[in-house]
Image: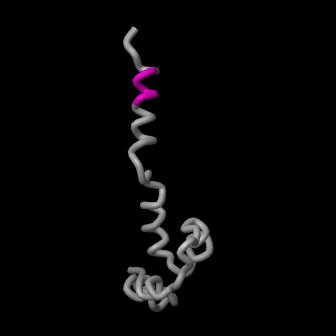
Amino acid sequence: MEITPTAQEQGQLSIEEEFGSYIATTSQADADVLTFWELEHMRFPMIYLIAMDYLPVQPSSVPCEHIFLLSAETNTKK
């Protein structure tokens, strides 16, 4: 049976410690979120993975509606 080292033994922070460090980080109000994660992904690896799940989400339904309208034009009954 192989025993793997814990995050603390590997020098990584627990999620609670990582979150506390992330919350304590100050950033400018006009900071670019993508640039922030490009620079800080090694410092906050677990939160980075969560951010990458949510950042690509469209903040508006307008692009989605546009796609449905386009699909109706290309998928018409002939």
Please, which colouring scheme is shown?
A: one colour
Please report the residue visible at 40 percent of the width from the left and 24 percent of the height from the top: 72
In the rendered image, the quadrant that contains the N terminus is bottom left
Please report the residue visible at 58 percent of the width from the left and 72 percent of the height from the top: 31
In the rendered image, the quadrant that contains the C terminus is top left
| Nearer to the camera, 35 or 53 | 35
Q: Residue 40: horizontal and vertical position, in percent?
A: 57, 77
Against 54, is 15 above or below?
Answer: below
Q: Residue 6: horizontal and vertical position, in percent?
A: 42, 86
Please report the residue visible at 43 percent of the width from the left and 68 percent of the height from the top: 50
Decide if residue 37 is on the left or right side of residue 61: right
| Nearer to the camera, 13 or 66 | 66
* 54 inside magenta stretch: no
Q: Which residues are magenta?
A: 69-73
Please report the residue visible at 46 percent of the width from the left and 28 percent of the height from the top: 70
Residue 3's image quarter?
Answer: bottom left
Q: Residue 16: horizontal and vertical position, in percent?
A: 37, 86
* 71 inside magenta stretch: yes
Q: Residue 12: horizontal and vertical position, in percent?
A: 49, 86
Q: Main secondary structure of the magenta part?
A: helix
